[in-house]
Amino acid sequence: MSKLVSPSLDTSSFSFSRHAISQAVLLLMAITAVPAFAQTSSDSKPLARVEITGSAIKRVDSESALPVQLITREDIQKLGVTTAAELMAKVSANIGGLTDGISINVGGDQRGFNSVNLRGLGTSSTLVLLNGRRMANFASPGDDAGVDLNNIPAAAIERVEILLDGASALYGTDAIGGVINFITRKDYQGVEASAYAGRTQEGGAEKRSFTLAGGIGDLSKDGYNVFAVFDQQHTGSLFTSQRKFIPELKIPERLGHLLSGYTDPANIRLTSNQLDYLQEQGFKINGKPIENRLINFSIPTCKPAANLYLPAGTGGADACTYDYMGDTELYPKSDKSSLLSRAVFQLNPEHQLYAEATWSKAKTYYVGSSARVTGYVDYRLIPQLANTNLHTLTDDEYPGEVTLRMRLKEAGNRTSELTSEAQRFVVGLTGTLAGWDYDVGVNQSRNVVRDRDTHGYVLYNELMDGIEDGLINPFGPSSAAGIKLLNSLQVNDEVRYARGTMTSVDFKAARPLMRLDGGDLSLAVGAEWRRERSIFTPSALLMSDNINNDFAPEGGTGTADSRTVEGIYTELLAPLSKQWEAQLSLRHDRYQGVGGASSPKVGLRYQPSQELLFRASVGRGFRAPSMSDLYRPTQYSSTATLPDPVYCKDNDNDLSVCADSWDTRRYSNANLKPERSQQHTVGVIFEPVRAWTFSLDYWNIKRSNLISEIGDDVILGNLDKYGDLVHRDEDKYIDYIELRKENRGSQIASGLDLAIEMHGINTSWGKISARMLGTYMLNSKLQTNPGDPYVSNLGKFVTEGVVQRWRHRLSMSWEHGALGLNLGNTYFSGYQDQNSAINIDDGSIVAANRVKAYSLWDLSASYALGKNLNLRAGIQNLLNTTPPFSNQANFFISGYDPSYTDPRGRFFYVSAQYSFK
């Protein structure tokens, strides 16, 4: 009889329509419905005992009571991806991870952070390991805590194990959603060189990489092995002007409410008194009486293509609207390098000494739209207003002063350079002592983030002086002296520096205790001591509060914090019989200043036959508040363009007046307590014949005592309850919205993980294999505060994102001699859009939009020229599918959701790998 094997992964990201699952399964069955007459059986070999993610006890059987997916090095090569972030984008359980697309913004925190988010529970609830040990988190303070995937040495990856179950009982904090364990090569000999080059069909976002690996020493013969892997990558930028689908989205016509009222020529914002006065005087623009506080004397021409006359847009009928989606970046330029070196020495037959050094550096260049400026000038400097006597309106706070909302096109696009650099050193000893399998190690890990404003950010006070002096013209081209002044005001400064350091000592040991009917009763014990430090240093220039669009928060200062973490755990593996196996584990952690938490877990495995296996687990977990949650400095940011119901009511729902990108202040909280979780899984694996394996796992997770902020759109949509978080000036205009970290509410998520795998079958016309991995979500909902109703984001964009009903990765492979072909599909189901816009005529919600399903196909071919040289060519996004239209208002990018889509379009690549020993 065949032996059950775990479905390995060609990774996934998908979504659900009612027919999507059946179509994928039927396609899989149709392509692989061939007779298995030519199967070859492998020779029987002794199976080594290995340790898998989710357990500290080595075992022969890779199928435990916990659901673990495997991505092999071969899978990664077939996908044509070169970074860990690209790889994780193919995992169906990864929902809403941070990407470079999300990082496209101007002024947001944690730019450059690429993360994984299992189950959609948050980046902070997914634990990322490298060779089974922690790495320092992304150092820049912000809402998310986790490992930057840019710091994973992707070229050195041998396999990735994904534990799709809570694992706090073994690993401690952050593992509520699951664990991603990147496992690198450990015993390599010879030299291997590879090169990769790719380009898009429409231009932009080109990529090239080079990898060199080398190793010496046979551990079993020579008693040592030393190897190193170096990787260098470059990716080019992609701008909105380079993609035809951007104008096809018709963003100005459909999403005028999300565009900007800061324009070139500048819009003028009158006070209420000024508007009333000018209307009484019969003031007109182009022969038409003005109706709104926002006016522009260039209408209806404005200054296309970016500055448009859109009466239904944020500029309103008397002013211009700026379409920043015609003037920004979709995909950033980046340069990434990594080096991993590992040495292992066989001290004697029972003991090994190992050392590992990892270095990585990712430099990403973000280009946003040109700077927006809020300026204040005397009305007499504007020729069209010079004779209106506005200075006589003494009820205004500053009589005669008008506000300019200008776009500083002459200063260029706002550009930032974000560098994330990581180092990790591990030294350890492993082996067998007195019947115990042990591993003890010291881990020193560091991440440094440098955020530099390089262009488009100017000194604000000097800019205002230049406008008042007439050198800089807000309404047209500036003089040569004005351009010279602007160039002299350009900021090139490392405005933020952050460093996070983690030092740890860990120990684990396992041994069999006694013989049971199904095998050895085994015990594992372990302990960990960890010291975490974080430093955040803003520059003196930033703290001077004089950088336009990068202002310092009130009271903002540098921070330096540290804490100690201690944890102990134990695990018991009990093969009660040949059919039944139990796994019991318990861990207790204590966080300095936060308190302690115990996390128990029980797993059960039942295999009545070689073809059928049942598994289940139940446990509790926790997430300690991150250093950023506890101590980060107050951060200033802004919302998407959102309407204020109070101001809209007072201004006849005039969007040009009552919709804006409101300022926010984000506060940490030193009194936060840990989140708690309860979770359970039930699954089955069925292998009716050697060729096919089917698995289905149900999972359910509930988080309580949630560490979160209330979403800004939720606050503005529930002012009766959260109005005290909206701070207003004397005119009832929003000064800022308060977003504060608190332990509040709960989150519930549940779903089904489906895996279908057709193992390699040899036929007269080649070897074929296929695999489908998908996640079908049953529930995903969030409670803002205890006692509040739950709000579901399942199949609906709410606040910060959506959880699609169905996501999958389908892959099919064919091999014949030296030739191989691979066809893959990544699928995301459609969903209800955010639909948060307000009709400017009656204040009603605009007609709902449903975001279409998103399906990407990729194709690759490989050819082996002898034993040493392998060539591969491929096409990602084979059908050149564009991102579906979305009216979401959460991200800087408008018109589509950048969290899961790829704006590059059809992408061609070739690679070559040469190895010799």
Image (cartoon, rainbow, N blue to C red):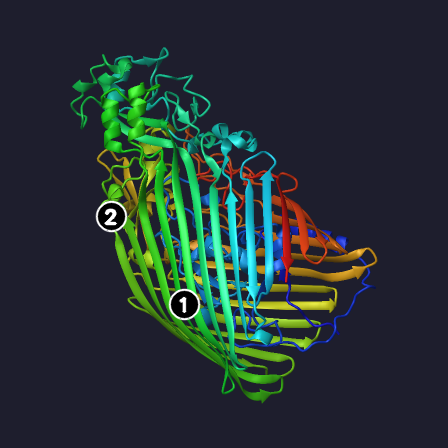
- Can you give x and y, in whole percent of width and height, for residue 104 in the image? 44, 41
Q: Position of residue 526 (x, y in %)?
A: 44, 77
Please tell me which residue is depicted at 39% across the width and 17% down the height of the picture. Answer: 299
> Which secondary structure, mark 1?
strand
Please state which of residues 841 and 188 is positioned toward the viewer in this rendering: 188
Quarter of the N terminus within the rendering: bottom right
Closer to the camera, 348 or 266? 348
- Mark 2 → mark 1, Cα distance in angstroms: 33 Å
Q: Which residue is tagged 1?
A: 443
State the image quarter where residue 502 is shown.
bottom left
634 displayed left or right of 223: left
* 333 or 262: nearer the viewer: 333
**What residue is at 56 percent from the left and 76 percent from the top?**
58
Q: Position of residue 126 (x, y in %)?
A: 46, 60
Give the label, 2 or 1, closer to the camera. 1
Residue 871 shows which numbered tag?
A: none
Is 852 drawn above or below residue 766 in the view shown? above
The vertical placement of 828 against 774, above or below, is above
Asked if residue 60 lies left or right of residue 780, the reply is: right
Residue carrying label 2: 556
Q: Callout 1: few (<14), some (14-19), or many (20+) C-alpha neighbours within 10 Å?
A: many
The residue shown at (46%, 32%) is: 325
Dot 2 falls on a residue whose secondary structure is loop
Q: Position of residue 670 (x, y in %)?
A: 28, 59
Q: Amino acid at mark 2?
A: Gly
The answer to whether residue 99 of the structure is visible from this angle is: no
Q: Is residue 308 above or below residue 518?
A: above
Task: Identify the image quadrant of the C terminus.
Answer: bottom right
Looking at the rendered structure, the kind of residue marked 1 is: Asn
Residue at the image position 67 percent from the left and 50 percent from the top: 871
